[in-house]
Image: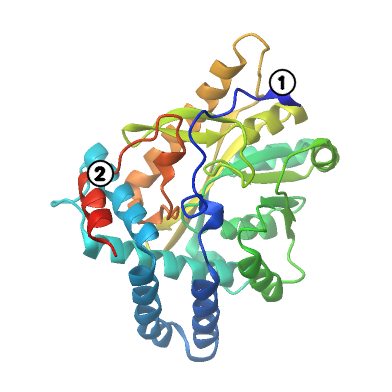
Amino acid sequence: MAGAYNKASQASPQTPSTHWAQIGESSFVAGMWLLYQIHRLLGRWPFLLCLYPVVSYYWLSRPLARRSSLDYLQRMQQAHGLWPQPPGWRQSLRHFRVFAQVILDKMLAISGRYPASRVQVQGQQAVQDLIARGQGAVFITAHMGCIELSQVLAEQRAGLRLNVLVHTRHAQQFNRMLARLSPGSQVRFLQVTEFNAATAMMLAERVSAGEFIAIAGDRVPVHKSKTTEAPFLGAQAAFPTGPYVIAALLKCPLLLMTCTHAGHGYALQIETLASQVLLPRAGREQALAQYAARYAAALEARLRSAPWDWLNFFPFWAQAQAPQPLTPLAQAQKSSSP
């Protein structure tokens, strides 16, 4: 299996406090569970009134997440100039509020309580064609918006069986909460903390049976894994090679699936990144970088219309082999943080 990957990132190992998998979640998940119950019993407006204290506490108590939010917003501004003024703490706080509302929508989606009428599904013909042929595929996703609304697609398309690969050790509490909300969901969450021969065989069996695999392409796994780099918002960023290697090994199409805010709901967008992922022995690393660049460009294009939907609150660009410096405002906030 090692030959299927490009060389490991040469970046210095991130400290436990900066790798995304080590960032604490307990207080935020507990707070969001309470808010979900308020929404369930009293409705959305009481939920929104209670939302601000929870978000404000999390924003104040997580300087790393706060700096990472500001760093992302600054990079988005520098790349595309979406706002009249450079983003500051108010925009970062808004970013956190959107995150909290998305968490609620994730819970509503998993529990089947999010209105399907508020989800626009775009590009579903590619999925319908695969289902008609009895062929499975790999969805590469991202931590942006409410990807859990893919359940709406699974419910609307007979024959679509979706398996979502998750790093459960990072979000054990959140995943237990989701399991409580929808024990009989058609979408299955599979814990995969490392990719080995047994994992490959399990995924191959599911794809050969016409099932679909969903895996995030924007986070380096918990155990240091092989990465490739691609330009993203004006700087090089590291992306895991796993999704491309899996699609190549399974000899199946690779589809991009994202779900971002649109109007009063979400747009679930699907497009084919590759009908077949080819990783030749000669030029394997270059091929991986090209697939990652295609993925990163598609993410950036979608974030331009939904900039608040980026939900990676950790030093994303620090994963690159040559870590990118923080933007000036984010660096200033780091210097002033306790």
x, y (%) of residue 137? 71, 37
**Between 31 and 109, the one nearer to me in the picture:** 31
Q: CA distance from mark 2 to mark 1?
A: 36 Å
x, y (%) of residue 124? 59, 44
Toward the left, the furthest residue is 84
Ranked by sequence position, the earlier of labels 2 and 1 is 1
Quadrant location of the N terminus in the rendered image:
top right
Q: Identify the element where label 1 is drawn.
A: helix
Q: Residue at x 67, y 75 (%)?
A: 181
**Between 31 and 318, the one nearer to me in the picture:** 318
x, y (%) of residue 157? 69, 53
Q: Is residue 5 above or below residue 72?
A: above
Q: Residue at x 41, y 88 (%)?
A: 46
Q: Is residue 181 above or below residue 12?
A: below
User: What residue type is disc 2 on?
Assistant: Thr
Q: Identify the element where label 2 is drawn.
A: loop
How is the structure coloured here? rainbow
Q: Is residue 255 above or below residue 163?
A: above
Residue 270 placement, left or right of 223: left
Q: Which residue is mark 2?
A: 327
Q: For residue 230, which quarter of the picture?
A: top left
